[in-house]
Image (cartoon, rainbow, N blue to C red):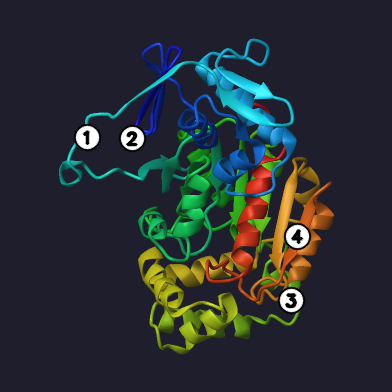
């Protein structure tokens, strides 16, 4: 439907707002707010209805609601003083008061429409020449998700494990994410596996994407990389969300982690990588995601095979086990949320608490789960995702 009011056109088919014939970029939540008002033009829309439509019923702060209303007014050429288009009725709700006309846009038969690209893939070059693949999806303000072990930009988008989470973020933000070196669509050749190499890859991606300051989300091995990045480039990160991470890799924190044990694990990886019934895969699933459904388990095997070779997996695993970012923690000076599963067998919850105690002002959330990978089938998944979204939206200024 096309909604025409004042000098604006709101087109729900093309998901576009125009004013004076020019496109006006708006965040997804602001667009939904305008759609709700247009659908109920001349009627009062309650705050509860607004929250239900724009935030799917989640609890949000008054500051967040006000920010989206202010952004909507700015987008349509209105302001809080004039209120000639969007009127506020104190303690009751909002109303679109400008005269409105609706028209149905010319429809192209569905079978003849070109497929809509949900994400676009690009490449950045790290400082040692490694090519890093990154993807952009969604619209609005940018959020960056750091790379971690086992990703593939194309397959993750449709994965029953990662797809729902990526689409939640993309429905609200312009999401930028990437495949780490040696994995997915990035260069398969590992030129370096020190933490400085991974930090350089993250910097190459955000520079290529044209991002100056952004929230950074990381999980598992992406956590120490993001901490090192935030401490090294404090002007680039304005918010940090860390899930299932660690300060010290296993070789650093476990004094009983002998080289013989490490060699045995590497041998298991090399012999059983991507093989559903191998001892390695059975051990991997029991540690990383014991609560996975059959569909999720099958997908994890598929992603393993697509993500990297057994040789690379062993080398990357060895490198991560030796990471130690304790020296970087005092340099992280941004609002930080740390989430950790209570029975995480990959990185114990004590590592999450160590992160929270080492980063000034960090918030800590422990969720009841034994999965290191947060799975949509896990009851804790909704809690984990909502906590991240709430933290991103908290007290943000108007667009």
Q: Kindly report the distance in space between the C-alpha atoms of the residues bearing marks 1 and 2.
A: 9 Å
Q: Element type at marker 1?
A: loop
Q: Are marks 3 and 4 in contact (CB under 8 Å)?
A: no
Q: Kindly report the distance in space between the C-alpha atoms of the residues bearing marks 2 and 4.
A: 39 Å
Mark 1 surroundings within 10 Å by alpha-carbon count, few (fewer than 14), some (14 through 19), many (20 or more): few
Give residue 123's quadrant in the image.
Answer: top left
User: In the rendered structure, which disc, 3 or 4, sits on the residue that comes first in sequence?
Assistant: 3
Q: Kindly report the distance in space between the C-alpha atoms of the residues bearing marks 4 and 1.
A: 47 Å
User: In the rendered structure, which disc, 3 or 2, sits on the residue that comes first in sequence?
Assistant: 2
Judged by depth in the image, the label closer to the viewer, 2 or 4, is 2
> x%, y% of residue 154?
36, 55
Q: Which residue is mark 3?
A: 254
Q: Element type at marker 2?
A: loop
Q: Are marks 1 and 2 in contact (CB under 8 Å)?
A: yes
> x%, y% of residue 205?
48, 41
Q: Kindly report the distance in space between the C-alpha atoms of the residues bearing marks 3 and 4.
A: 24 Å
Q: Is residue 193 left or right of residue 92?
A: left
Give residue 53's quadrant in the image.
Answer: top right
Q: In the drawing, what numbered circle is on residue 107?
A: 1
> x%, y% of residue 204?
50, 40
Q: Kindly report the distance in space between the C-alpha atoms of the residues bearing marks 3 and 1.
A: 62 Å
The residue located at (47%, 70%) in the rendering is: 313
């Amino acid at each position: 439907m096309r909604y025409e009011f004042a000098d604006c056109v709101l087109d729900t088919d093309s998901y576009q707002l125009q004013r004076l014939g020019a496109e006006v970029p708006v965040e997804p939540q602001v667009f939904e707010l305008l759609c709700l008002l247009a659908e109920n033009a001349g009627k009062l829309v309650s705050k509860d209805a607004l929250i239900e439509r724009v935030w799917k019923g989640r609890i949000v702060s008054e500051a967040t609601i006000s920010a989206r209303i202010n952004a909507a007014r700015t987008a349509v050429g209105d302001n809080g003083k004039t209120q000639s288009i969007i009127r506020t009725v104190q303690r009751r709700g909002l109303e679109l008061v400008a005269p409105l006309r609706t028209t149905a846009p010319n429809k192209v038969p569905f079978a003849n429409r070109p497929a809509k690209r949900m994400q676009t893939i690009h490449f950045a070059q790290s400082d040692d020449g490694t090519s890093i693949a990154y993807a952009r999806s969604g619209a609005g303000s940018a959020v960056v998700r750091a790379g971690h072990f086992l990703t593939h930009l194309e397959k993750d988008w449709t994965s029953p494990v990662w797809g729902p989470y990526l689409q939640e973020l993309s429905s609200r933000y312009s999401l930028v994410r990437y495949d780490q070196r040696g994995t997915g669509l990035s260069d398969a050749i590992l030129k370096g596996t020190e933490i400085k190499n991974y930090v350089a890859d993250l910097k190459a991606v955000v520079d290529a994407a044209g991002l100056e300051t952004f929230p950074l989300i990381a999980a598992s091995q992406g956590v120490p990389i993001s901490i090192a990045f935030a401490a090294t480039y404090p002007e680039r990160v304005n918010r940090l969300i860390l899930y299932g991470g660690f300060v010290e890799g296993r070789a650093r924190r476990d004094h009983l982690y002998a080289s013989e044990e490490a060699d045995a694990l590497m041998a298991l990886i090399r012999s059983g990588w991507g093989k559903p019934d191998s001892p390695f895969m059975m051990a991997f699933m029991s540690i990383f995601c014991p609560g996975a459904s059959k569909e999720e388990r099958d997908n994890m095997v598929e992603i393993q095979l697509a993500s990297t070779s057994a040789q690379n997996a062993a080398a990357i695993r060895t490198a991560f086990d030796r990471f130690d970012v304790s020296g970087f923690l005092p340099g992280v000076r941004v609002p930080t949320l740390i989430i950790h599963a209570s029975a995480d067998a990959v990185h114990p919850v004590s590592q999450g608490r160590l992160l929270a105690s080492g980063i000034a002002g960090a918030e800590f959330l422990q969720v009841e789960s034994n999965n290191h990978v947060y799975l949509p089938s896990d009851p804790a998944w909704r809690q984990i995702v909502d906590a991240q979204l709430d933290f991103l939206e908290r007290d943000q200024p108007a667009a």
